[in-house]
Image (spheres, rainbow, N blue to C red):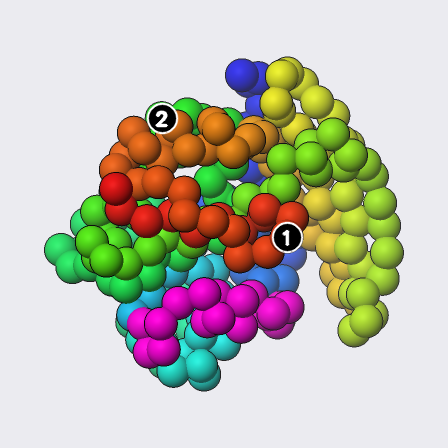
């Protein structure tokens, strides 16, 4: 491990504990994630969304007929969510006392370099997943760690996005800073992340009472797990 902070953000407005800029995330729209999750789970399934942010995916899931409980550590993020039950809590200490058809953990949170924290995240997932339910995790495809490099581009809606300061400070680790621009506003989000190959992820899942059950896409970035 390196001594640098795992997540850090800068820019105008409130910065959430994970370094995400609330003002930025409140303006982002989903890019097919709700539909991808919806296609992989039963109609009307209850969903626990861990790390929901400002509701970018939450609102799409609601529109597709799901009951959603949205969890985030940032009250400023949760204030942007409409129509879902919201819970302010760190993922690792969540204890709702109920289970859901689907537990959703997106935004590459599972790739934290902190092994104990990752296991705590998976423990929360298992404790809140129904025995006949599932957990859906989003990770970077393992090969991304070999090919990731700096870039910059402009999105269809005119926003600037880029990745800078890419380095590999240790085996399986990647450090980088995302840069976002909208008008005259600019945000950065620096992170340190750990590669999770299939065997490593399966070992971590099994330790917390889960097992891999397949992928939602061809690049293996979206993983479906079920209780053992």
User: Which quadrant is the C terminus positioned in?
Assistant: top left
* Magenta stretch bounds: 26-45
- Of 210 and 98, nearer the camera is 210
- Locate residue 122, reporting x and y percent: 34, 40
**Magenta run includes residue 146:** no
Q: Which residue is mark 1?
A: 218
User: Which quadrant is the N terminus positioned in?
Assistant: top right
- At 55% across and 44% down in the image, what residue appears? 139
Q: Identify the mark at residue 100; answer none if there is no mark.
A: none
**Magenta run includes residue 44:** yes
Q: Which residue is mark 2?
A: 116
The answer to whether residue 198 is above or below residue 155 is above
- Locate residue 65, reporting x and y percent: 38, 82
- Locate residue 4, reporting x and y percent: 58, 23
Indicate the quadrant where residue 69 lies. Answer: bottom left
- Of 177 and 151, nearer the camera is 151
Total numbered labels placed on residues in the image: 2
Which marked residue is nearer to the observer: mark 1 or mark 2? 1
Q: CA distance from mark 1 to mark 2?
A: 29 Å
- Locate residue 12, reporting x and y percent: 64, 56
């Amino acid at each position: 491990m390196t001594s640098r902070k795992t997540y850090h953000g800068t820019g105008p407005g409130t910065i959430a504990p994970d370094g995400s800029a609330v003002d930025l995330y409140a303006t982002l729209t989903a890019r097919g994630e709700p539909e991808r999750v919806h296609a992989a789970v039963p109609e009307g399934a209850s969903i626990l969304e861990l790390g929901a942010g400002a509701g970018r995916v939450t609102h799409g899931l609601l529109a597709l007929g799901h009951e959603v409980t949205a969890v985030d550590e940032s009250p400023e993020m949760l204030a942007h969510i409409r129509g879902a039950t919201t819970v302010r809590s760190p993922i690792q200490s969540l204890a709702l006392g109920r289970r859901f058809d689907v537990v959703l953990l997106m935004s590459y949170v599972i790739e934290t370099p902190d092994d104990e924290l990752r296991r705590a995240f998976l423990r929360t997932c298992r404790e809140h997943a129904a025995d006949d339910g599932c957990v859906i995790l989003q990770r970077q495809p393992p090969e991304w760690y070999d090919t990731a490099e700096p870039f910059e581009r402009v999105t269809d809606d005119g926003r600037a996005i880029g990745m800078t300061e890419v380095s590999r400070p240790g085996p399986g680790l990647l450090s980088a800073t995302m840069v976002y621009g909208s008008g005259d506003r600019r945000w950065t989000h620096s992170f340190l992340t750990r590669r999770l190959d299939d065997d490593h992820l399966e070992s971590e899942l099994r330790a917390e009472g889960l097992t891999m059950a397949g992928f939602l896409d061809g690049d293996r970035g979206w993983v479906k797990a079920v209780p053992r």
